[in-house]
Amino acid sequence: MFKLDRKLVTIGMTLALSTTLAVAAASAAAPGVYKSKSGAIDGGVTYPRENGNYTAYKYNTQSTKGVSFGRPATANEIKAWDIDALPDGTGLPEGEGSVELGDELYEAQCAVCHGDFGGGGQGYPQLAGGNQDKDENGIVKTLKNQRLEPGMDAPKRTIGTYWPVATTLFTYIRDSMPYAHPKSLTNDEVYAITAYLLAQNEIEIDGEEMDDEYVLNKEKLVKVVLPNRNGFYPNIDGPNAQEDIRAFFADRAKNIGAGTRCMKDCKDPGMDGKTEAKVMKIGYEMKDVMPPYAYAKDLPPETEGGSISKAEKMYDASCKLCHATDTMGAPAVGDANTWETVMKKGMDTVLVNAIKGMGGMPPKGGNMDLSDDDIKEIVEFMINSSKKH
Amino acid sequence: MNRETEEKLTSVSRREFFKKTASVSAVAATSVLVPSTVFADDENIMHHVKWGTTLGDEVNKNPYGVPSLYEHNVVRRTSPLMSSAGDMHAAISMTPLHEQKGIITPNGLHFTRTHNGVAHVDPNKFRLMIHGLVEKPIVLTLEQLKRYPSESRILVLECPSNSAAEWKGPQFGTLQMVKGMMACAEWTGVRLKTILDELGLKPEAKWMLAEGSDGSEMSRTVPIEKVLDDAMIVWGQNGEALRPEQGYPVRLMLPGWEANLCVKWLKRLEFGDKPWYAKEETSKYTALTASGKAIQHFYANEVNSIITSPCPEVPWTDLEKGDLVEIEGLAWSGHGTIKGVDISFDGGKNWVEANLKGLVLPKAWTRFSYMYKYEGKPLLLQSRSYDDSDNVQPTVNQEKAVVGVEGVYHRNAIITWKVTDMGEVSNVQIRS
């Protein structure tokens, strides 16, 4: 990166280097211009090859001084968009929320993906759990887990075992969650869910355990020191940060791994320095891809006539995420038995549930732009698509 | 043509063709006139073809052109492994590298990674705010942004998770799924420095926060040195507007760096004196090493290469002993320009130099080629690239020895294609 990054061609973007580059591409040519000679078969010019190259970029060497578009941003506009927060708390909003409220909100809006108590599930990120014990060097021991053989334990990357700072948790939830309808939570609710997740990770603030009554706010969140705060490198904080980063990435062989350009009778010892490398084949091939593998140069199969209905479009946009399969706990469209059970409640009840929400499902699936009539059409589509054939 | 002739035609394979013409050199055979008695006449030559005897489509049947229907299998592919519970809103789909021609990826095949689905930004409502430690914070509409002088660069974009499924051993059986989280395109936009020159960047500005406007509000922290070096804000992709999957109307472009840092659906750039610890700089996009510590702010993608022909999808099963065939591949480096590529036939014990061909540009795909005489022997085929920053692509063991197998990101270990004596190709690893 930095130093290494600024090799010949990268800096070729600048005026000074465009000279060097052009010279490399076609010696004795003017900056940014390639040597050519007349007499080509098409009446144009021919470009001789030098050093194996025809050409490279021709850089625009004109001054852009004084080019300026746009207008000043107003103070209110900046206030509306500049809501990020730094680890020192700069930018965090006022507000507060208890672990107990966070528990309720989490159960209603988060558990469907992230599992009970943040324990993970369905393949969505696990948020809590994992052993936080550290070794004598302050390293979280389980983060050293390496799955070199099948069946070995994975390192757990949860908030408690892995994340560096807690302010990120607040901005993450506020800006990007809940997944299907982000930015729908109030600041108080975000503090509450943040509190709940910190409590699930057994985080203490100022030596105090976070019980159900614990109320989190800006001042308290800033005090959180997550267990793996020092588990990252290179250093990115303080006045020397960028020098530290530069030094780290300059030593790639030590920090990242590098190859060697051996050409004959090369040896490739394993991690113990002795074991000879051998051929490892695919154990269990991941063949489950979409669309399925196909390579024929033939005509595509005939698609069924007609475009999809308005109801199906609305279903695709607002409901399918949870209702396509039963992994989210919602009745899966196409599952006749489940829908038979659902319909025993009667159409009116099913409609009311869809409009007002029930269990893990938010009102109207989280899309309040849908009218009650839209919901009726969607529900009818879902029922019709789930009948026994 | 009668039925008997047709059957004869379809039953004569190319293999048999060469047996019957054994008296002539197999290499030269294609250019030698074969006596007509050896072969049935080809129906496609002897008869008029359908498309030559009917009226074709009207010139503007597809106002926006589409590929030949016969190419319908050349598509991006994804796998539940690259999603959460098969939910394809936070997922990734891979470029079909086995069908990639040259170094420019068609926009419809550019790999796509989203964290909250593909956003559809209304260009009339698009606003870009640049503020923080600048004298003059500004707001730009799309039209105003595009008034800036533009620059076009051919650049590879690679997800730092490319090949992440392969850390613990080979897992996918195709080039597309092993290495398809990347693509290369010509990107058009303005250099960020050109805009900043007029905004009065304050000396204490050390970091830039780039933020997207999609549901995930993707944001990343970028050091100022990169911002002032070659960072761009781009709105053009291979001659047209960015595709929605690539951040329409505008994304950040940090040449050579993780595609995740090149924030899509860009909304806001803020300059500050401290890094933000944005959400994708915590549990994700940090590389956990065997020491238990993790690499953060892992910017540039590594020097890398892959053989694209042969590959599992394009094997050598049609070749005859003695055929001269091109081994072809792609090399790239986030640090600079590819200097060369070596090829090994024996799993890395001995190497020969391949040739680079076509455009050799910094931080772009570079094509390499090696003319090879096929002998029908089993091979362990590898490519190893090196760049002008003196980075050399490591073996699996060399990379593993430093970072272990749980890092997820920035995997650039040498890929091995096992070629059988029948010319079949599969993904294996040379490791201990």
Image (spheres, coloured by chain):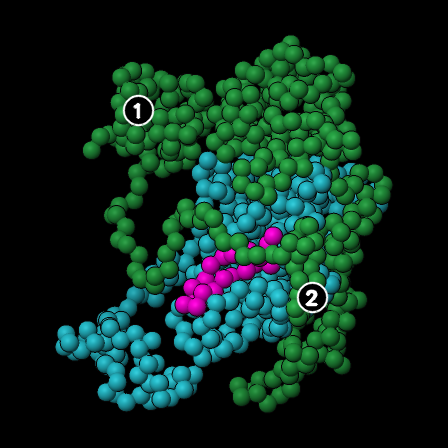
Chain colours: A green, B cyan
Dot 1 surroundings within 10 Å: few (below 14), some, or many (20 or more)?
some
Task: Say which of A185 and A179 sits in front.
Answer: A179
* Label tally: 2
The chain holding disc 2 is: A
Residue at position x 78%, y 53% in the image = A251
Q: Which residue is mark 1?
A: A338
| Residue B420 can be seen in this image | yes
* Residue B344 placement, left or right of A240: left
Question: Residue B246, image x and y in percent?
Answer: 54, 50
Task: Say which of B10 and B89 sits in front.
Answer: B10
Question: Residue B388, image x and y in percent?
Answer: 72, 65
Residue at position x 59%, y 61% in the image = B305
| Residue B133 can be seen in this image | no
Q: Nearer the viewer, mark 1 or mark 2?
A: 2
The chain holding disc 1 is: A
Q: Is A137 placed above or below A307 here?
A: above
On-image quarter of the N terminus of chain B: bottom left
Residue B36 falls in which quadrant of the image? bottom left
Amino acid type assigned to the residue bearing label 1 in the image: Thr
Q: Secondary structure at mark 1?
A: helix
* Residue B45 placement, left or right of B154: left
Question: Residue A63, image x and y in percent?
Answer: 76, 63
Q: Which residue is mark 2?
A: A261
Q: Is A112 placed above or below A279 here?
A: above
Question: Residue A214, image x and y in percent?
Answer: 67, 12
**N-terminal of the two: label 1 or label 2?**
2
Q: Is A1 placed above or below B89 here?
A: below
Amino acid type assigned to the residue bearing label 2 in the image: Arg
Q: Which residues are magenta?
A: B414-432
Task: Say which of A349 and B146 sits in front.
Answer: A349
Q: Secondary structure at mark 2?
A: loop
